[in-house]
């Protein structure tokens, strides 16, 4: 059943995705396995997407630019390798 609250939540997610489409990622020059948000306007879009999703921008950036794998010994977390997460999209 549709409610105004559900409609608003859906629109916030769509708006956040549209903002993320404007974020430009670049390879970190000091660590070629890591990604950074290109400076300037795209960073504003990351902040807007985070606000719409109700999360903090650094946490959203970490979720977009790292990869966690489960192994028998536990979690293995690392960079995505030359912004592979962005290039997959």
Image (cartoon, rainbow, N blue to C red):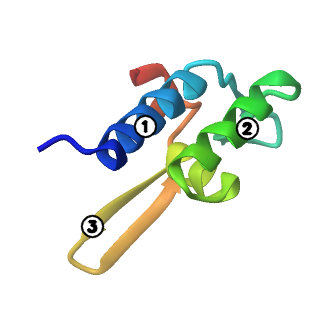
Q: Is residue 44 above or below residue 34?
A: above
Looking at the rendered structure, the secondary structure element under dot 3 is strand
- How far from the left and from the top, in percent, is residue 77? 46, 63
Q: Earlier in the sequence, mark 3 or mark 1?
A: 1
| Label 1: few (<14), some (14–19) or many (≥20) C-alpha neighbours in 10 Å | some
Q: How many marks?
A: 3
Q: Is residue 89 above or below residue 16?
A: above
Q: Residue furthest right?
A: 40
Residue 29, quarter of picture: top right
Q: Earlier in the sequence, mark 2 or mark 1?
A: 1
Residue at (68% x, 38% y) in the render: 48
Q: Which mark is residue 13?
A: 1
- How far from the left and from the top, in percent, is residue 78? 51, 56
Q: What is the C-alpha distance between the residues marked 2 and 1?
A: 23 Å
- How far from the left and from the top, in percent, is residue 21? 55, 20
Tell me the residue that label 3 is attached to. 70
Q: Nearer the viewer, mark 3 or mark 1?
A: 1
Q: Nearer the viewer, residue 19 or 68?
A: 19
Tell me the residue that label 2 is attached to. 36
Looking at the rendered structure, the secondary structure element under dot 1 is helix
């Amino acid at each position: 059943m549709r409610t105004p609250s559900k409609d608003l939540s859906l629109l916030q997610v769509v708006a956040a995705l549209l903002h993320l489409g404007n974020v430009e990622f670049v390879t970190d020059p000091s660590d070629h396995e890591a990604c950074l948000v290109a400076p300037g306007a795209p960073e504003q879009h990351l902040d807007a997407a985070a606000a719409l999703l109700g999360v903090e921008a650094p946490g959203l950036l970490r979720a977009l630019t790292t990869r966690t794998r489960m192994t028998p010994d536990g979690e293995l977390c690392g960079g995505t390798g030359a912004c592979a997460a962005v290039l997959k999209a």
